[in-house]
C-alpha cells in the first residue's frame, strides 16, 4: 500500500522535529507525566475497591457478632419465659392462684440481673393482667387487643412470639413484648407470660461507635423496625421492605446496595431461633475516609512528582541551550572573582592543609606589609606572633576534624606585620573542599583604630564619672555653705531684728497702742521667717545627720514627710546602719530625700514602705509605694527626670547597685545596695569635714 505524499510529509516533519534534543526531552517529559498520572488514577481506583470490600467484610463480621449477642440475650428471655410457664403449671397442680404474692416474688426474682427485661407479667385467658414483677397487687389492665394475646389464643404452645413495638399504656415509652403461651393441664388456653424488652439495652448493645457502620437496626420478619442505633422515634414501628434470604441459607446472610446522596450497603442476618432480622449498614463515604486521605496524599505526591518531572524537563532543556553560554560565563566569572578579591577592602588569605598560603590579595599585602610574591607558598605562621602559633594550630586541627563540609568561625586574633609590629585583627575562618582539596580561607580586618577608639571612649567615660562625682561633692559642699550662711548671717540678723522690735514695743504700749499692735505683727512675721530659714537650713544640710547619724536623720526625714504629705509609712531601720562612712550616710540620706520627693510629686500613693538594713558589709535601702507606677503618664517624670539621674549617680559614685522596678502593690520599687568597704574618691563629700549647723532656739 502506497503512503500518501501528505502523510509522508507529516512523518518527515515529525522526524525533523524529534531531531532536536530539546524537543525530544520535552516529549519524553510529557509522556512520563501522563503515565504517572494514569498509573496513580488506576491505583486509586483499585485501592477504593479494596477499601469498600474490606468495609463490607468488616460489616459482615460485625453483623455475625451482634447477631450472636442479640440471640443470646433473647435466649435468656426465652429461658425466663419457659421457666415461668413451668412454675405456673406447678401452681395449678398445687391448686394455687397465679395472682398470689408468691408469684409476684417469683416474677421479680426471675428478671433480677437481666437488664434487657424491664417487666415480666401474667395475662389470664380473658386478656387481663393478673400479676407482674413491677408491683403487687397490680391494677387490672385489659390487654386482649394486644398482638401477643391474640397470637397465643389462636396458636398452640411451644412457640415464642415477639410482637410489634407498641407504646406502653402506663409509661408512654416504646416497648417490645416477647411471650409464651400458658395452658391448663388439659391443654386449654390459660393465658400468657409476657416479657417487656428494654429497647435501650439492645440499642446500647448495637452501639459500636464506628464511623462507617451506621445505623444498626433490628426488624421483625414482616419488616417492622424494633430498634435502631442511633435511635429515630419516627421510624420505630414502621414497616420496611427487607431483602429476602437466599434459598438454602443457614444464617440468612445477604446484602443489598442503596444509592441516594450517601450510597452504601446493608448486611442482613437472621437471628437464629427468633423471627428477627439484623441489618448493619455501611456508608461508602465514611468507609472511604482513610482512602480519601491516602488519595489526597497520593495525588499531592503524584502532582509533586509530575511537577518535579516537568521542572527537570524544563531545566534540562534550558541547560541544553545554555551549555555553551555557561562555559563562556565560567571563564568570565573566574576573572570577575579574581577582580573582586583583588579590590576587596578586607584582607583575604587562603591556605592548604599544610597551612601554606595559596591566596594573598592586595589588601593582605597592605595589612601585613608583605608582597604576594614573598607570601605565596610561605607558612601562615609567619604572620602570627610566636606565642599564639600553638593555639592557632590547635584551632585549625579542630576545624579540620569537623565533619561539616563548610563552616565559618569568627574570632579576634593578633596579627604580625613583616616589620614585627603586632596589631589586633578580626577574622572569619571558613573551611571548604573543592575537588577533594581542603582549603582554609580567612577574611581579616585590622581593628587597631577601633581598639584605640574604645580605649579613648573608656577614658572619656571614666573622666565623666569623676566629673559627676566631683559635681555631687561640690553640690553637697555648696549646700553646706549656703546652710551655714543662712544660719550664721540671716538667722542672727533676724534674731537681732526681733529683739529690737521687742524693745520698741514697750515704750509704745502706753503712748501709741496702735503702733504696738503693728510691731507685734512684725515680730510674728519675723518668727515665721526664722522658722522658714530653719526649715530651709535643715533641708540643705540636716544637723541630725552630722550630730546623731544616718538612722536619726532618716527617721526625722520620714516623719516630717509623713506629717506634711499625710501618707502612711511602714519603716524598718537597722540601728547598725550608723556604722557606714559619712559620705555613704550623706548619699543614702539624699537618695531617700529624692525618692520621697518624687513620690509626693508623681506617685499619688497612700502608703510607702522603707527598709534600711546592714547585711554582709552591704547597706541595703528599699523604698516601695502603692502609687501609679512607672508606666503611668503622671509618673513619666520620675522615670526620665533628674531625680532618678541623681540617685543613679550617687549610687555609682559609691560603687553600688541600683534596681528600679514595679512593686507588689503596683507602684515603684527602688533598691539600693552600697558596699561599706568602698574607697571614697574625695573627702569633699564627707560631712565630717564641714562645720555642723545647730539651729538655736529662738
Image: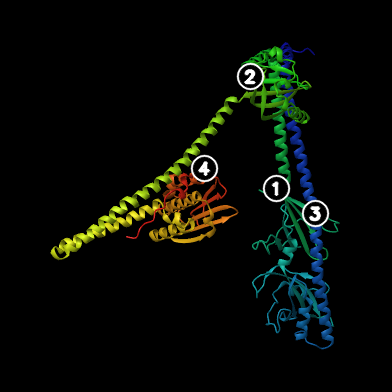
Q: Is label 1 in a helix, a strand or a loop?
A: helix
Cα gap from disc 4 to disc 3, whole angstroms: 97 Å
Between disc 2 and disc 3, whose residue precedes?
A: 3
Between disc 4 and disc 1, whose residue precedes?
A: 1
> Considering the image in quadrants, where does the N terminus appear?
top right
Image mark for residue 367: 2
Q: Residues within 10 Å of mark 3 (few under 14, many from 20)?
A: many
Q: Are marks 2 and 4 in contact (CB under 8 Å)?
A: no
Cα gap from disc 3 to disc 1, whole angstroms: 18 Å
Residue 317 spot, x, y in % from top left: 70, 19
Residue for point 47% across, 40% down: 468
Q: How crowded is mark 2: few (under 14 residues within 10 Å), some or many (20 or more)?
A: some
Closer to the eye: label 1 or 2: 2
Q: Is label 4 in a helix, a strand or a loop?
A: loop
Residue 151 spot, x, y in % from top left: 76, 72
Residue farthest along the bottom direction in this orientation: 95
Query: In front: 545, or 211?
Result: 545
Q: In this view, does 585 lie above or below 127?
A: above
Q: Is label 3 in a helix, a strand or a loop?
A: helix
Closer to the eye: label 4 or 3: 4
Residue 142 spot, x, y in % from top left: 68, 79
Query: In front: 229, or 487?
Result: 487
Between disc 2 and disc 4, whose residue precedes?
A: 2
Q: In this figure, which residue is indicated by the disc labeled 4?
A: 681
Between disc 1 and disc 2, whose residue precedes?
A: 1
Q: Is label 2 in a helix, a strand or a loop?
A: helix
Q: In this figure, which residue is indicated by the disc labeled 3?
A: 60
Q: Residues within 10 Å of mark 1 (few under 14, many from 20)?
A: some
Q: In this view, does 473 lie above or below 326?
A: below
> Considering the image in quadrants, where does the C terminus appear?
bottom left
Amino acid at each position: 500500500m502506497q503512503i500518501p505524499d501528505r502523510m509522508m510529509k507529516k512523518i518527515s516533519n515529525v522526524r525533523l522535529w524529534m531531531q532536536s534534543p530539546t524537543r525530544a526531552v520535552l516529549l519524553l517529559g510529557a509522556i512520563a507525566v501522563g503515565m504517572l498520572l494514569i498509573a496513580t488514577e488506576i491505583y486509586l481506583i483499585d485501592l477504593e475497591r479494596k477499601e469498600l470490600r474490606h468495609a463490607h467484610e468488616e460489616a459482615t463480621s460485625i453483623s455475625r457478632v451482634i447477631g450472636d449477642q442479640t440471640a443470646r440475650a433473647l435466649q435468656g428471655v426465652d429461658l425466663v419465659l419457659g421457666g415461668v410457664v413451668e412454675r405456673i403449671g406447678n401452681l395449678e397442680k398445687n391448686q394455687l392462684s397465679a395472682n398470689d404474692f408468691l408469684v409476684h416474688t417469683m416474677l421479680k426474682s426471675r428478671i433480677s440481673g437481666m437488664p434487657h427485661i424491664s417487666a415480666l407479667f401474667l395475662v389470664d385467658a380473658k386478656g387481663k393482667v393478673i400479676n407482674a414483677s413491677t408491683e403487687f397487687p397490680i391494677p387490672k389492665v385489659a390487654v386482649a387487643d394486644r398482638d401477643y394475646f391474640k397470637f397465643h389464643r389462636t396458636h398452640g404452645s411451644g412457640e415464642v412470639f415477639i410482637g410489634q413495638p407498641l407504646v406502653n399504656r402506663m409509661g408512654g415509652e416504646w416497648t417490645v413484648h416477647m411471650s409464651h403461651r400458658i395452658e391448663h393441664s388439659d391443654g386449654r388456653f390459660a393465658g400468657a407470660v409476657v416479657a417487656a424488652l428494654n429497647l435501650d439495652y439492645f440499642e446500647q448493645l448495637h452501639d459500636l461507635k464506628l464511623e462507617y457502620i451506621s445505623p444498626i437496626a433490628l426488624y421483625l420478619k414482616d419488616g417492622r423496625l424494633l430498634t435502631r442505633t442511633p435511635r429515630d422515634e419516627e421510624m420505630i414501628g414502621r414497616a420496611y421492605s427487607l431483602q429476602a434470604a437466599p434459598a438454602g441459607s443457614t444464617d440468612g446472610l445477604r446484602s443489598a446496595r442503596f444509592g441516594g446522596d450517601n450510597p452504601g450497603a446493608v448486611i442482613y442476618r437472621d437471628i437464629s431461633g427468633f423471627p428477627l432480622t439484623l441489618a448493619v449498614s455501611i456508608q461508602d463515604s465514611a468507609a472511604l475516609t482513610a482512602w480519601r486521605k491516602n488519595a489526597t496524599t497520593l495525588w499531592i505526591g503524584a502532582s509533586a512528582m509530575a511537577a518535579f518531572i516537568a521542572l527537570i524537563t524544563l531545566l534540562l532543556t534550558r541547560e541544553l541551550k545554555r551549555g555553551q553560554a555557561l562555559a563562556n560565563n565560567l571563564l568570565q566569572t573566574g576573572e570577575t572573582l579574581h577582580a573582586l578579591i583583588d579590590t576587596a577592602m578586607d584582607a583575604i588569605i587562603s591556605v592548604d592543609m599544610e597551612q601554606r598560603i595559596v591566596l594573598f590579595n592586595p589588601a593582605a599585602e597592605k595589612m601585613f606589609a608583605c608582597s604576594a610574591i614573598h607570601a605565596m607558598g610561605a607558612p601562615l605562621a609567619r604572620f602570627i606572633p610566636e606565642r599564639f602559633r600553638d593555639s592557632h594550630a590547635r584551632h585549625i586541627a579542630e576545624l579540620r576534624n569537623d565533619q561539616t563540609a563548610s563552616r565559618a568561625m569568627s574570632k579576634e586574633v593578633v596579627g604580625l606585620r613583616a616589620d614585627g609590629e603586632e596589631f589586633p585583627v578580626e577574622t572569619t575562618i571558613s573551611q571548604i573542599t573543592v575537588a577533594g582539596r581542603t582549603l582554609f580561607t580567612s577574611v581579616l580586618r585590622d581593628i587597631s583604630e577601633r581598639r584605640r577608639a574604645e580605649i579613648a571612649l573608656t577614658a572619656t567615660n571614666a573622666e565623666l564619672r569623676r566629673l559627676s562625682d566631683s559635681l555631687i561633692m561640690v553640690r553637697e559642699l555648696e549646700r553646706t555653705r549656703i546652710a551655714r550662711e543662712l544660719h550664721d548671717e540671716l538667722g542672727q540678723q533676724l534674731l537681732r531684728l526681733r529683739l529690737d522690735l521687742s524693745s520698741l514695743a514697750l515704750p509704745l504700749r502706753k503712748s501709741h497702742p496702735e503702733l504696738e499692735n503693728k510691731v507685734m505683727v512684725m515680730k510674728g512675721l519675723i518668727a515665721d521667717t526664722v522658722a522658714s530659714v530653719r526649715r530651709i537650713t535643715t533641708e540643705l544640710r540636716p544637723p541630725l545627720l552630722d550630730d546623731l547619724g544616718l538612722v536619726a536623720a532618716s527617721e526625722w526625714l520620714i516623719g516630717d514627710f509623713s506629717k506634711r504629705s499625710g501618707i502612711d509609712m511602714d519603716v524598718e531601720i537597722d540601728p547598725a546602719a550608723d556604722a557606714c562612712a559619712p559620705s555613704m550616710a550623706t548619699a543614702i540620706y539624699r537618695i531617700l530625700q529624692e525618692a520621697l520627693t518624687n513620690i509626693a510629686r508623681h506617685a499619688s500613693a497612700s502608703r510607702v514602705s522603707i527598709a534600711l538594713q546592714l547585711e554582709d558589709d552591704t547597706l541595703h535601702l528599699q523604698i516601695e509605694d502603692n502609687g501609679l507606677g512607672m508606666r503611668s503618664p503622671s509618673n513619666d517624670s520620675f522615670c526620665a527626670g533628674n531625680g532618678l539621674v541623681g540617685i543613679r549617680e550617687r549610687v555609682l559614685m559609691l560603687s553600688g547597685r541600683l534596681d528600679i522596678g514595679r512593686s507588689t502593690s503596683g507602684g515603684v520599687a527602688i533598691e539600693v545596695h552600697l558596699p561599706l568597704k568602698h574607697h571614697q574618691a574625695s573627702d569633699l563629700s564627707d560631712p565630717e569635714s564641714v562645720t555642723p549647723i545647730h539651729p538655736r532656739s529662738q
